[in-house]
Amino acid sequence: MAMTGNDIRKSFIAFFEERGHKHVRSSSLVPHNDPTILFTNAGMNQFKDYFLGNQNPEFKRAVTSQKVMRAGGKHNDLENVGRTDRHHTFFEMLGNFSFGDYFKKDAISYAWEYLTKVLGIPEDKLVASVFEDDQEAFDLWNKEIGLPADKIGRLGEKDNFWSMGDVGPCGPCSEIHYQLYPLQDGKSVQQSLEDDDGTFLEIWNLVFMQYNQEADGTRVPLPNPSIDTGMGIERIASVVQGFTSNYETDLLSGLVDYLKENAPDPKDNDADVTVSARVIADHIRAVVFLISDGVIPSNEGRGYVMRRIIRRAARHGKELGYHAGFFSELVDNFVPMMSEAYPEIEENQDYIRILIKQEEKRFSTTLNHGMKILDEILEKYRKADNRLVNGEEIFRLYDTFGFPADLAEDVLQDNGLDYNREEFDSCMEEQRQRAKADQDTKKVDLKVSEVYLALTDEGLQSRFVGYDIFETQTKMQAVVKDGSRTSEIHEGDRVEVLLEETPFYAESGGQVGDTGEIVHDEFRIVVNDTQSPVAGLILCHGIVSSTTSDVVTIASTPQVIARVDGKKRIATQANHTATHLMQSALRTVLGDHVKQSGSLVNPEKLRFDFSHYASLTKEQIGDVETIINQNIRENEEVLDESLDFDSAVNAGAMAIFGEKYGDMVRVVTAGSSSKELCGGCHTSKTGNIGLFKIISEESIAAGIRRIEALTGAAAIAYVQENISNMESISQSLKVPMNEVPERLEQMQLQIKDKEKQIEQLRNELQQFTAEKALQEVTKIGNIDVLMMRTDPASDLKAMAATLLKKMKTGVVMLSKTPDQQRISVILSVSRDLTDKIHAGNLVKELAPIIDAKGGGSPNVAQCGGGNPAGWDKLKSRLSEKITSV
């Protein structure tokens, strides 16, 4: 029996572990600290700092099975998904890496051994390609592996040279290809690879990172060449399992077959049915992993891409006869297929299902709204006897409302119309160019400042000792000013200080950087922030507040006193521990789908973002507060310990969406209710928090809520202020405090009753005014016309409609002047007269008389201007216009 996708993944990792590689868990689909890409799109993304030289590798060899997304940005396969055998939005990239350890010989040897010995792929089915100038790689394939020269293609830079960007690490690569079909008549392997004629399938890319691309275009050899390889598990599974399509492998076929077999109303064309089933199968994989990694549907960035994927799946589901809600139900079919390798999708299964279901409902609403707009477009073009709809209008429907263009096309064609695709494509291209330009403006230089790299190259590091102490005597290892190291400081200088041992916590995990002071006999530095630009470096940012002389020369590693602002740190620690207690309480009250997706912890307050699909009720907020304050009163110890990642997770420790963890992690346990992976600072006992009070709860995105809360003295002050306000209200209403809510409710009901009475009187007055106004109707030609000023509080539109209804046919123009500087005008025309008198066009033409702009539909139009004195002239001109009809 052929190996399954899971078998291949396990065998790949085991093979390289046996050869000294560290198995590194897949990073999140949301790139960690890399704003240059929307999604993790390659196995090497999580090692980018190693390749760029920003960070010294923790290990020399690594093996991964990396979750990858290619939808949006430079790498975007979305439109091809389902229509080809091999394109996907989500897939897994198997990869082995060497950071200055082994190079070409071992990379090629390992790849050949794994493919032929472990997977059992026949050697005569494999060929290789190398960069045309890479004789070393050619000789390794030919002489070491024994691959005949005519089975090694030499390809150009486009196919066999890889670079990270315009500057940075780069190098030639060698691709391994599997022969699917016999060579076409007269063609060699070289010609077939050059033509990319489908004879061969690329299965593994070995990148030999041996140069650094300089800004002037030159390539300088790297001192420690590295290896980066990538092999899509879906592709290699198709080879091992004997299929020509990835969708036939066990990784996808179960979903595809299920969708086809259970389709309520599939199209007659089986090829179209297969395409739709493949699209949906691919898309459910992508969406499940995206949501599990913290992405939520939205109108921008990653959330917008995911929203498009969900809606594209819903569109294809409609093609198969599935109704709204079917896509969310697929979650339970898919999760068991991948949860062994990625247990996080099982942990988040319920939340994922609920979030997708909500998005399907939104799309259903979008379709209904879009259909109304499309009906208006149809009506407009039918009246004009025009069968070709402007492509810009269909694009606007797609871009603004998310209405699929292909669905619009179906509706148009059902009604005997079509749309201009060139205009639509032009709008789409303009949008792409705008998005590209916007992305270009956001490009970030990920290269860390040379001064920081120089510090790490010297072996300088900071050791954080501030979990338990706020003050220590330590050595000042380096001072940075204006981006360079310095040995001289002056009063007023802005500096960054590297201490050997530091009590200052660097901003991380939502906790702000510490403030305080660094004191020496000859100077004092006020620290206003602490950051860690590179792993191992903790830099105190501050201002030299005083010196004993104009210029202080800093001796080598002088002894200083480093002192954290204890009051601020104590408050921050209490707020940080409170966020842990809150996550636990939220999961108790709302369910296990609740997970932290962001936070801010400072001395003043705490902010906590979490996954949930509905606003919290007053009762739920009260329950959360009750649980946390109970935890506080129990005054349990807050403990921390260092564990390996797997042991920590198995012990029930919570991890954060998208956070990058090492092999060893710090586990913080707050009493009996909370256990989380956390590197931050915490209070020693829950009782030190004092009091917990939620001050706001809101939505910040679909499926993400935000709570802000106070603790300790700040919470007490907040409660006292609210009690004081309640006492004032109680005194004003002349009722006890506990009766204030009931009294306010009574007053609201009384106000509503009065408002109804006022509305009734207003309607009666309007009817009376209308009856009286009808006496002012005049004839212009054979058309009844009424022009009059009304009360400043009048509802012009409602009054005009009432008058016109009573008149049955005619023209009504009303005005009101809220003050001496403004005038509002409405013009209403009965429908039987709009072919002669167009209200919108008339108002547009006459509005300048009252210094206004306006317009509207054929039967109702309005304008507002700053020249009330022009009213009589406006009436006169309208009379002239009607006379000329």
Image: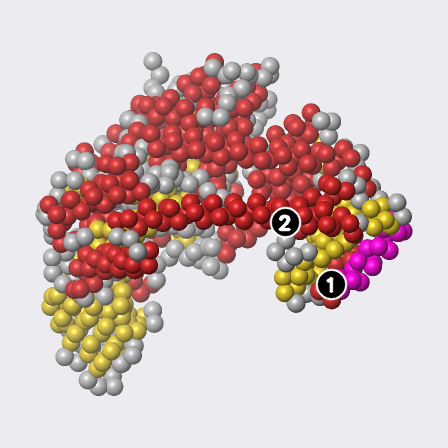
- C-alpha span from label 1 to label 2: 28 Å
Q: Is residue 846 left or right of residue 723?
A: right
Relative horizontal placement of residue 45, taking residue 712 as reference (left or right): right
Residue 685 against residue 64 in the figure, above or below: below
Q: Nearer the viewer, residue 246 or 862?
A: 862
Badge 2 marks a residue whose secondary structure is helix
Report x, y in % for residue 824.
68, 58
Q: Three-letter amino acid code at disc 1?
A: Ile
**Is 884 one of the magenta-colored residues?**
yes
**Does residue 40 appear in the picture of this structure?**
no
Quarter of the N terminus within the rendering: top left
Height in image: 407 above or below 711? above
- On screen, residue 354 versus residue 316, left or right, reads left
| Mark nearer the viewer, 1 or 2 | 2
Q: Secondary structure at mark 1?
A: helix
- Residue count near mark 1 (Cα–Cα under 10 Å), binned few <14, some 14–19, many ≥20: many
Can residue 349 be seen here?
A: yes
**x, y percentage for residue 297?**
44, 39
> Could you tell me residue 378's position as x and y percent?
71, 33
| Residue drawn at 69 percent across, 25 percent down | 414
